[in-house]
Amino acid sequence: MKKALICGAGGFIGSHLVKRLREKDYWIRGVDLKYPEFSKTEADDFIIGDLRDPRICIHVMDQAFDEVYQLAADMGGAGYVFTGHNDADIMHNSALINLNILDACYKKNVNKIFYSSSACIYPKYNQDDPDNPKTSEKSAYPAYPDSEYGWEKLFSERLYLSFHRNYHMNVRIARFHNIFGPEGTWEGGREKAPAAFCRKIAEAQDGGEIEMWGDGEQTRSFLYIDECLEGVDRLMKSEFTGPVNIGSEEMVTINQLAEIIMHITGKKLTIKHIKGPLGVRGRNSDNRLIKEKLGWAPKYSLKEGLNKTYLWIQEQVKEKSHEA
Ligand code: NAD
């Protein structure tokens, strides 16, 4: 039986990863500041701990692990990452976690380590045209991410690659592009666009109005959680270190994203465009490298993923209104 340590196992992707690896008969230890919010963890063992503390990182590796998945980060959607108000925390907290975890993996001789980087590392100057954003892996340099979150991810990618180069550590790095699905943050300020619009649309009365930051013509692609985890699994099994994009190539405008969700619900709502934090003008995943290296790329449609996510968020909204 393989043993895995999942850092950030109380978060959205981490808690889904626990479930997936349990299905594959792994023995799993999760670690996070908190337990998963929306369902009971399926990890065999779960430690509540702060990975900014190097002693905790050593402690959680008090036994041999075949694989470590490092997903813990101080992060959120545009409302958290792009306002500038959280920059110091984002950089300091996430950098400390990565420095500590990697050092502990080295000292404890961990066999294989996965690191979740982000599409936010790509240079702003390649993402000004909403119809033609560039995100091939090699376009990351010269570096110019549009947020401190992206700079920290880029620094940490380089940190993992340095340990790979100097200490021959077996690392895998993926750049996730907007992962979404049920049991993700859907309110409170850290939620991302798909969850935010599912919530707003679920809360609105038919014929009403929802607010959207910006003109809605900025483009993005969104990847359903199951496909993200399939990509992680394939990357871990491959001989390819990365970094490699794990994202969808189905690019839509944010207006289209909201319209797809409205279509799912049958509600007709007016979109009111207001000022707000936005990020780059356009972004899409470039899947040429993942196809070449892994012979695979995600293909699940955005609509299918939104269908499942909307149903889950609608339930959350209903439950909350009953509680109130
Ligand atoms: P998340 O915020 O749901 O999960 C991150 C988890 O890390 C949280 O549960 C949080 O409590 C935990 N954490 C934060 N600081 C910690 C600390 N000091 N000690 C222990 N745990 C700590 O985010 P997610 O969406 O599940 O993302 C997982 C990873 O994937 C992150 O590294 C994120 O940057 C990366 N990523 C996510 C996306 C996405 O669209 N969700 C896109 C690109 C990259």
Image (spheres, rainbow, N blue to C red):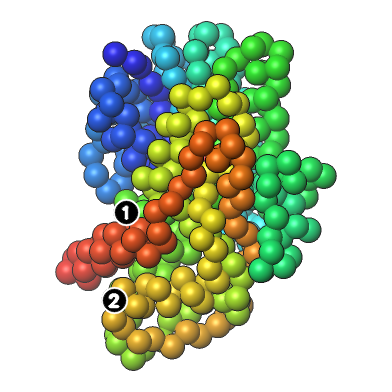
Front label number (1 vs 2): 2
**Structural crowding at the residue carrying mark 1, measured as other residues with C-alpha within 10 Å and reported as few (<14), some (14–19) or many (≥20):** many
Looking at numbered disc 2 in the image, what kind of residue is underneath it? Thr
The reply to whether callout 1 and callout 2 are in contact (CB within 8 Å) is no
| In the image, residue 246 above or below residue 184 | above
- Is residue 297 or residue 220 the one in the foreground? 297
Q: What residue is rendered at 62% in x and 40% in y?
A: 289
Point 46% across, 24% down: residue: 237
Question: Label 2 belongs to which residue?
Answer: 265
The quadrant of the picture occupied by the C terminus is: bottom left
Picture layout, residue 103 above or below residue 307 = above
Quadrant of the rendered structure where residue 106 is? top right
Q: Secondary structure at mark 1?
A: loop
- Image coordinates for residue 280, horizontal then vertical, percent: 67, 62
Relative image position of residue 32 (x, y in whole percent):
41, 33
What is the distance, in whole Å, between disc 1 and disc 2 at their CAs? 16 Å
324 vs 132, nearest the viewer: 132
The crowd level at tag 2 (other Cα within 10 Å; few <14, some 14-19, many 20+) is some
| For residue 192, side relative to residue 182 (left or right) | right
> For this view, does 90 lie left or right of residue 17?
right
Per the rendering, the mark at residue 182 is: 1
**Measuring 50% from the left and 85% from the top, which residue is drawn there?**
272
Residue at position x 57%, y 17% in the image: 170
Q: Tag on residue 250?
A: none
Instruction: Give the quarter of the image for residue 154.
Output: top right
Image x and y of residue 145, in percent: 72, 50
The disc labelled 1 sits on which kind of residue? Answer: Pro
